[in-house]
Image: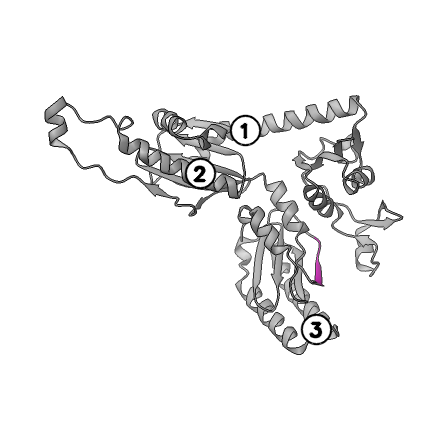
């Protein structure tokens, strides 16, 4: 699945307790040759490791072991190396498997537990900065899910929608000498109310920034008949049709998306500057980790590609070399940044990913404190 399919409801489902063993397999991958040649070999090695772990675990019954291995084999057979991004996550238990290809790197590991390991999914979701796009006219409404990777058509909550065709009305034309304007007819208002209802359901289930693309009269009427579109962070008054493609929409949205991203980055910078001046600021991995654990962080800003391997000692984090992750030390955390992001989101903290180098003076990670 893609990152933008990670709804809050799905993440909650994946994190639920389930019968042991729930297997989580993560590994870094490569988008292009020649580096991607190693991915299939690394995946086979991890699957073999997972099998050995299942065989050696006294808590795993033979039936559960065979069922999980079968689900893992099905998952591996379905992995499409041509769609590889920065990492692969495979989740499997006795009854199902899930595959995620993420635009964010993960460590190489196999975990057996009574729930799936989701921190890499959560961090990827937060870093993707997903958004919704509604392509609109008086005759159609299509929904697209967007991330930094592009746009993808969505089929949910009734979308895509097509307005019922209005047959010509000779009696009306004969009576008042015209035909109704496209955007003044009650049929158009009814159709856009239906669009508003669908949009409200989408935003309630998965709140994201919303962008609108369509003729100005259509956008105006949607505002008039409903409330959902008023939450849009960007609008592009451009005619669209049911045949308008995702790449075409993305080109039209370019300036609005760039403006939104710059405004978001500026807002984060201002909040960090204000916090630094008022002594409600934490900088660096150890300080921010402590603030998050104590529930004091209101905003965590982290550089886009920051990762660190650490050893946890007396509740503090000590950076160590990547080679330490293979030594079997249970206190070494290879994916501490993703773990921190998940913990921050769990405590209701806002998480923002910022450009690499923008937090260089603060250890690549900073937080605005609530208290």
Q: Quadrant of the C terminus?
A: top right
Disc 3 secondary structure class: loop
Q: Are marks 3 and 2 in contact (CB under 8 Å)?
A: no
Residue 267 position within the rendered picture, expressed as x and y whole percent measured from the top left: 64, 25
202 magenta-colored: no
Distance, label 3 to label 1, CA atoms, is: 51 Å
- On the image, numbered disc 1 is attached to which residue? 258
Q: Are marks 2 and 1 in contact (CB under 8 Å)?
A: no
Disc 2 secondary structure class: helix
Q: Are marks 3 and 1 in contact (CB under 8 Å)?
A: no
Give, as a single range, the part of the protein colored magenta.
107-112
Distance, label 2 to label 1, CA atoms, is: 23 Å
Q: For residue 177, say whether it is visible.
A: no
N-term mark: 3 or 2? 3
Q: Horizontal placement of 353 versus 326: left or right? A: left
- On the image, numbered disc 2 is attached to which residue? 199
- Marker disc for residue 60: 3
Q: Horizontal placement of 270 versus 363: left or right? A: left
| Frontmost residue, 274 versus 308 | 274
| Frontmost residue, 265 versus 40 | 265
């Amino acid at each position: 699945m893609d990152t933008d399919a990670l709804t809050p409801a799905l993440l909650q489902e994946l994190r639920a307790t389930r019968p042991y063993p729930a297997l989580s397999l993560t590994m870094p991958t490569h988008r292009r040759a020649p580096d991607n040649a190693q991915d299939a070999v690394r995946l086979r090695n991890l699957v073999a490791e997972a099998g050995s772990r299942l065989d050696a675990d006294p808590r795993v019954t033979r039936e559960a072991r065979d069922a999980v291995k079968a689900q893992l084999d099905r998952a591996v057979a379905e992995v499409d190396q041509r769609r590889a991004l920065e990492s692969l996550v495979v989740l499997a238990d006795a009854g199902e498997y899930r595959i995620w290809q993420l635009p964010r790197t993960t460590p190489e590991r196999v975990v057996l537990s009574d729930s799936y390991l989701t921190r890499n999914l959560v961090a990827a979701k937060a870093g993707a900065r997903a958004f919704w796009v509604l392509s609109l006219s008086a005759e159609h409404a299509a929904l697209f899910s967007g991330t930094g990777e592009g746009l993808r058509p969505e089929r949910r909550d009734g979308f895509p929608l097509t307005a019922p065709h209005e047959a010509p009305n000779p009696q009306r034309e004969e009576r008042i000498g015209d035909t109704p304007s496209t955007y003044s007819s009650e049929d158009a208002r009814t159709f856009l109310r239906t669009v508003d209802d669908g949009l409200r359901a989408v935003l309630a289930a998965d709140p994201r920034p919303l962008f609108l693309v369509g003729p100005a009269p259509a956008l105006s009427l949607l505002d008039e008949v409903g409330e959902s579109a008023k939450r849009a962070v960007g609008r592009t008054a451009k005619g669209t049709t049911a045949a308008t493609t995702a790449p075409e929409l993305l080109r039209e949205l370019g300036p609005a998306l760039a403006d939104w991203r710059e405004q978001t980055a500026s807002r984060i910078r201002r909040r960090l500057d204000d916090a630094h001046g008022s002594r409600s600021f934490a900088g660096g991995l150890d300080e921010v980790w402590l603030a998050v654990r104590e529930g004091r962080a209101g905003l965590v800003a982290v550089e886009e590609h920051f990762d660190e391997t650490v050893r946890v000692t007396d509740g503090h984090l000590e950076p160590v070399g990547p080679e330490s992750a293979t030594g079997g030390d249970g206190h070494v955390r290879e994916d501490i940044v993703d773990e921190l992001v998940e913990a921050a989101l769990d405590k209701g903290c806002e998480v923002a990913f910022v450009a690499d180098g923008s937090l260089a003076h603060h250890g690549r990670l900073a937080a605005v404190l609530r208290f």
